[in-house]
C-alpha cells in the first residue's frame, strides 16, 4: 500500500520561509518522480516542483524558481520542499505526489496516481 505522509506548512508573513516534508512508503524508489503540487481557492491544481529519484533531475514552476528548493533524502524516503521569500500568492493547499514524471527538457511535471492529504500554506501580507 502506497502512503504519502506530509508535514510542515502553516502561517507565515510575506518574505518568510517554510519547509514541507513528505515521506513515501510502498513504492519502488528508482521508478518514480516525487514532488509538490498546490491548489489555491477557485484555481486548478498546479505543479510546483518535482524531483526524479533516480538521478535528482528537477522541475520548478516559473513562480518557484529562485525561491523554492526541492531535495530528497534517500535514507528516509523523504522529499523536502524549502520555500523562501514567500508571497501571498503562494497561499494554497500543497499536495505531495509520487509516481509522476518529468517531461523531456524538464519543462513540465506530470503527476502520478499517489497523493498526500495536503497541507495548508498561508502567507499573510
Image: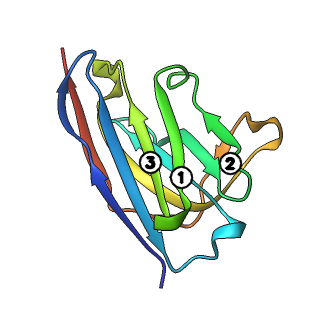
Picture quarter containing residue 121? Answer: top left
Q: Residue at x 25, y 44 (%)?
A: 120
Instruction: Using residue 5 as the reference point, say whether residue 121 is left or right of it.
Output: left
Say which element carries label 3.
strand
Distance of mark 1 from mark 2, alpha carbons?
8 Å
The disc, 1 or 2, on the residue closer to the chain's N-terminal end is 2
Q: Which residue is mark 3?
A: 80
Q: Of residues 108 and 13, which is closer to you in this image? A: 13
x then y, percent, for residue 52: 67, 52
- Is residue 124 depicted above or below 121 in this figure? above
Q: Are marks 1 and 2 in contact (CB under 8 Å)?
A: yes
Q: Residues within 10 Å of mark 1 (few under 14, many from 20)?
A: many
x then y, percent, for residue 27: 58, 76
Instruction: Using residue 82 as the reference point, say whether residue 114 is left or right of it.
Output: right
**What coloring was used for the rendering?**
rainbow
Q: Residue at x 27, y 20 (%)?
A: 88
The disc, 2 or 3, on the residue closer to the chain's N-terminal end is 2
Q: Which residue is mark 1?
A: 72
> The C terminus appears in which quarter of the rendering?
top left
Residue 41 visible? The answer is no
Q: Residues within 10 Å of mark 3 (few under 14, many from 20)?
A: many
Residue 56 is labelled as: 2
Q: Are marks 1 and 3 in contact (CB under 8 Å)?
A: yes
Q: Residue at x 71, y 68 (%)?
A: 31
Which residue is most to the front? 75
- Is residue 71 depicted above or below 25 in this figure? above
Residue 60 visible? The answer is yes
Instruction: Using residue 105 as the reference point, say whether residue 31 is left or right of it.
Output: left
- Is residue 5 depicted above or below 123 in this figure? below
Say which element carries label 1.
strand
Amino acid at each position: 500500500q502506497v502512503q504519502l505522509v506530509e508535514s510542515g506548512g502553516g502561517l507565515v508573513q510575506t518574505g518568510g520561509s517554510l519547509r514541507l516534508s513528505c515521506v513515501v512508503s510502498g513504492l519502488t524508489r528508482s521508478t518514480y518522480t516525487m514532488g509538490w503540487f498546490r491548489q489555491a481557492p477557485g484555481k486548478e491544481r498546479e505543479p510546483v516542483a518535482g524531483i526524479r529519484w533516480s538521478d535528482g533531475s528537477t522541475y520548478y514552476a516559473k513562480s518557484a524558481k529562485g525561491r523554492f528548493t526541492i531535495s530528497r533524502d534517500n535514507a528516509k524516503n523523504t522529499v523536502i520542499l524549502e520555500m523562501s521569500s514567500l508571497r501571498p500568492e503562494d497561499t494554497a493547499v500543497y499536495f505531495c505526489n509520487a509516481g509522476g514524471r518529468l517531461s523531456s527538457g524538464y519543462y513540465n511535471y506530470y503527476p502520478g496516481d499517489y497523493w498526500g492529504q495536503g497541507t495548508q500554506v498561508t502567507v499573510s501580507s
